[in-house]
Image: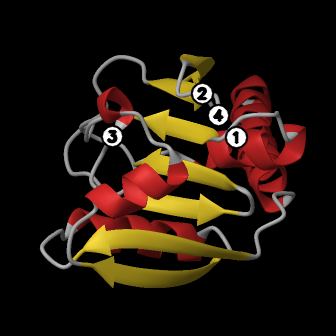
Amino acid sequence: MKARRSVVFLLVSLLLIASCAQKVAVGDLPTGEVVVFKSANCGCCGIYSQYLEKQGFAVTVQQVETMEGVKERFGVPQDMQSCHTTKVGDYFVEGHVPVEAIAKLVTEQPDIAGIALPGMPSGSPGMPGSKRGSWTIYAVQRDGSTSEFMTM
C-alpha cells in the first residue's frame, strides 16, 4: 500500500512539474501588443484572438474588408496563407500558429519576415477538432522563400 502511494505521489508530482515547466516557458514570452488582421466573415479568427489574450498578449483586432492587401503588405506568400495575419513586433504570424512557435520567434529573433502555419489545420488554436499528425510551422524569408521553422 505504501509503495502504491509513493508511485501515485511521484506521478502527481511529475505532472505538476511538467505543467509548471510549460507555463514557465510560455510565461517567459515577451507578450506585449499584437494586432490580428481578419475579415468580418471569419469566426475562427476571433477565437484565435481570445487564445492569444489568454496567453497574456494585449490583442487589437483589426477587421478589414479583404485580406489580400494585408498579406501583400507583410509579404505572406500565397501558399503560406491562412484566414488571418497577426503582427507581432516586426514579424508577421500567419494563421493558427501555437504560442510556442511565437515564443521561439520572439526569443530567437531570426532575420526573417515571419512564420506561417498554412491553411486551417484541425485542432490548431482557434480551430475545432482534434490535432491530426504534426504541424510544420514555416519561416518566411523577406524574399518569400520558406523553410521549416519548427514542427509540432
Say what amino acid the circle numbered 2 marks: Asp
Q: Which residue is mark 2?
A: 143
Q: Which residue is mark 4?
A: 142
Labelled pair 4, 2 in contact (Cβ < 8 Å): yes
Say what amino acid the circle numbered 3 marks: Gln
Q: Is residue 131 left or right of residue 107?
A: left
Q: Residue at x 28, y 23 (%)?
A: 132
Labelled pair 2, 1 in contact (Cβ < 8 Å): no
For the N terminus, the image quarter is: top right
Residue 137 at x, y percent in the picture: 52, 28
> Please, what secondary structure does the residue beneath circle 2 have?
loop
> Please, what secondary structure does the residue beneath circle 4 have?
loop
Q: Is residue 67 left or right of residue 3?
A: left
Q: What is the spatial separation of the Cα atoms under label 2 and label 3, in whole angstroms?
A: 15 Å
Residue 124 at x, y percent in the picture: 36, 43
Labelled pair 1, 4 in contact (Cβ < 8 Å): no
Q: What is the spatial separation of the Cα atoms under label 4 and label 3, in whole angstroms?
A: 15 Å
Residue 141 at x, y percent in the picture: 64, 28
Residue 29 at x, y percent in the picture: 81, 58
> Please, what secondary structure does the residue beneath circle 3 have?
loop
User: Mark 4 or mark 3: which comes first in sequence?
Assistant: 3
Can you tell which of label 1 and label 4 is closer to the viewer?
Answer: 4
Say what amino acid the circle numbered 4 marks: Arg
Q: Which residue is mark 3?
A: 81
Say what amino acid the circle numbered 1 marks: Leu
Instruction: Estimate how packed mark 3 is, as few (under 14), some (14 to 19) or many (20 or more) residues with alpha carbons within 10 Å.
Output: some
Q: What is the spatial separation of the Cα atoms under label 4 and label 2, in whole angstroms?
A: 4 Å
User: Mark 1 or mark 4: which comes first in sequence?
Assistant: 1
Q: Which residue is mark 1?
A: 15
Q: Nearer the viewer, residue 103 or 144?
A: 144
Residue 66 location, quadrant: bottom left
Q: What is the spatial separation of the Cα atoms under label 2 and label 1, in whole angstroms?
A: 44 Å
